[in-house]
Image (spheres, coloured by chain):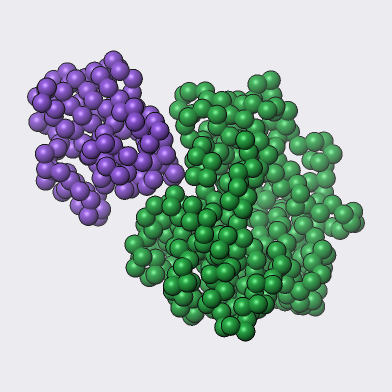
Chain colours: A purple, B green
Amino acid sequence: MSKIPSDLKYTKSHEWVRALPDGNVEIGISDHAQDALGDLVFVEVPEEGRKVAAGEAVAVVESVKAASDVYSPLAGEVFEGNANLAATPELVNQDPYGNGWLLRLKPADKSALAKLLDAAAYTKHLETEAH
Amino acid sequence: MGLKTPLYAQHLGAGARMVDFGGWDMPVNYGSQIEEHHGVRRDAGMFDVSHMGVVDLKGARVRPFLRHLLANDVGRLQVPGKALYSCLLREDAGILDDLIVYFLSESWFRVVVNAGTRDKDVAWIRKHAVEFSVEVSERKDLAMIAVQGPNARDKAMMILPPFDRANALALDTFVGAEIAGLFIARTGYTGEEGWEMIVPASRAEEIWKSLHAAGVAYCGLGARDTLRLEAGMNLYGSDMDESTHPLESGLGWTVAWNPPDRDFIGRTALESIRKAGSPRKLVGLLLEDRGVLRSHQKVIAPGAGEGEMTSGTFSPTLERSIGLARVPAGTGERVQVDIRGKLLGARVVKPPFVRNGRSLVS
C-alpha cells in the first residue's frame, strides 16, 4: 500500500501539492506514481520564472522503462526546480514527499489549492484506478 | 488474462510487478530493476524465459532442412550440443524471427524462438518441413530459466547432483548438454557468463526455488532488456522485424554466404540487397547530453539524412543513455537525436557497450 500523507493535496494524475507557510507551494509525484514508474534515471525540472497553466506539462520524470510528463496541479510561476535531482533522480523513489520534490511554485490563485483532491479522495481514486 | 508460465505463482509470491509481454503475464521486476541489473553484472541473477518457444525438429533430413530454412548455416554445427544464432527469413529477406538452434544429433535439432512470434514461426517451420519429412513438435512441456552473471555457474551448479557438476562446468561457450535430466546450455542474453536451462515444466518451481536458495537473485524482463542492450544484442520486434532485413539490422555476421550454392530462404533477395549496398545500417548510440534515448525517437545524421532509434534506455552500468538506431549508411561519427523537441548530441559507437561487467566504450 502506498503512502498518502494527509497534509497534502493531490491530483488524479498523481502529483502532490504542499502548501508552504509563505503561501507558495511545493509539487512532486506521489508514492504510488514513483512505485509505478520504477527506478528513476532522469528528471527534468522547469526553469525559474517559467509561467505555467494548471494541467500544463511542467516536468519530466524518466524511469528505466519510460518517460512521463508531470502536470502542474496549479497555475502560477515557478521559482525553484529541485537542482539535486539532476545528479540523484533516485531521490524521487526514495523520498517522494520530501527530498524528492520537483518544483516550487507561486500560485496565481491561492484558493485553487482547496479544489484539489485531499488524501481521502486520492486514496479513493487509486482504488478505482486499480479496478 | 494472458498466458502463464509454470513459474507464475512464484513470481506473484516474490512480489513481482507483472506485465504483458507477447501475450504472456511476465515479471518486469521484483522491486528495483537497476538492482537486478547490477546483480547480474556483479553476481548472479535468474530470469523466467519459459514464454519462449522450444521446438524440436526430428527426421533423417533435418540438417538439410535447416540449411534451407535458416540464414546461418547449421552445416557449421559438428559437435553435438553446439548452438548457432540465426535469422529466420522470408523470401524477400524480411526477418520473421531470430533464434538459437542446437544440434543434438544427426536426426534431432532444437530451436528456441521468441514468445511473440512462436505461433507464426511454428506455422512457417511446419509448412517448409513437409518436403523434408521433418517432424516438428512444440515442447510445451518444457520451461526455461536463464541464470546469468559472473557467479551464475558456480551458484547454479549447486542445485545439480555432485557427480554432474564437473560436466556442467566443462561446457564450452555456446554448447548445451543433457545433464541430470535438464538441458543446460552455456548461452544467454546479457553479455555475462551463465546458463540457459531447459527443464521439465513439472520441475520448474522446484528448480527455481533451489536456485534462489543457492543465492541466485530474481530478475525481471526490465533488467533483461537493459542487460541485452548494454550487450549490444537485438530485440526482435524493436530492432528488427519482417519489414527489415539482416544487413540493415546489424546482423550481417549471422548470414552464412558460403558455400555459395546453399539455397536458403531469402538468399536471392538478400544477395541483391548486398550487391546494391544496403541504404541503411543499425548502429549503437551513446548520448552525450543528459536525457534518455527511447525507441522511435528521430535521429538526424548530418549530411546523410534521418534515421530512427530502435531501442534506447538508461544504462545502469555506464550511468548514461545508450541505444540502437537505424540510420542512413553514410552516417558519420556524430548524430543528433530529437528527444521531446530538443536536439541532443550522440556519438555513434560499435556495440556491445558492456561485456563481462566491463564498459567497452569511453
Q: Is residue A101 visible?
A: yes
* Vertical order, B34 against B58 (above or below): above
Point out the image quarter for the C terminus of chain A.
bottom left
Residue depicted at x 60% and y 40%: B324
Q: Quadrant of residue B170?
A: bottom right
Q: Residue B205 location, x and y as percent?
A: 45, 75
Residue B90 lies, with reference to residue B186, above or below; the image says above
Choose top left, top right, bottom left or bottom right for residue A93.
top left
Is A93 rendered above or below residue B135?
A: above
Horizontal side, residue A123 vs residue B353: left or right? left
Residue at the image point whose x is 27% and y is 22% from the top = A80
x, y percent for residue B278: 76, 37
Please indicate whether residue A104 sits to the left or right of residue B89 in the image: left
- Is B102 left, or right, of A72 in this rendering? right
> If the image is split into quadrants, where does the N terminus of chain A sit?
bottom left
Q: Is residue B133 visible?
A: no
Q: Is residue B214 above or below residue B28?
A: below
Q: Is residue B288 left or right of residue B283?
A: left
In the rendered image, the residue lying farthest to the top is A49
Using the image as rendered, state which of residue B156 and residue B67 is in the foreground. B156
| Residue at x-position 11% and y-position 22% | A22
Depth check: give the residue in front, B252 or A77. Answer: A77
Residue A71 appears at what percent x and percent y? 28, 30
Which quadrant of the structure image shows residue A111?
top left
| Total number of numbered discs in the rendering | 0
Residue drawn 17% across the image and 18% down it: A108
Report x, y in % for residue B41: 54, 54
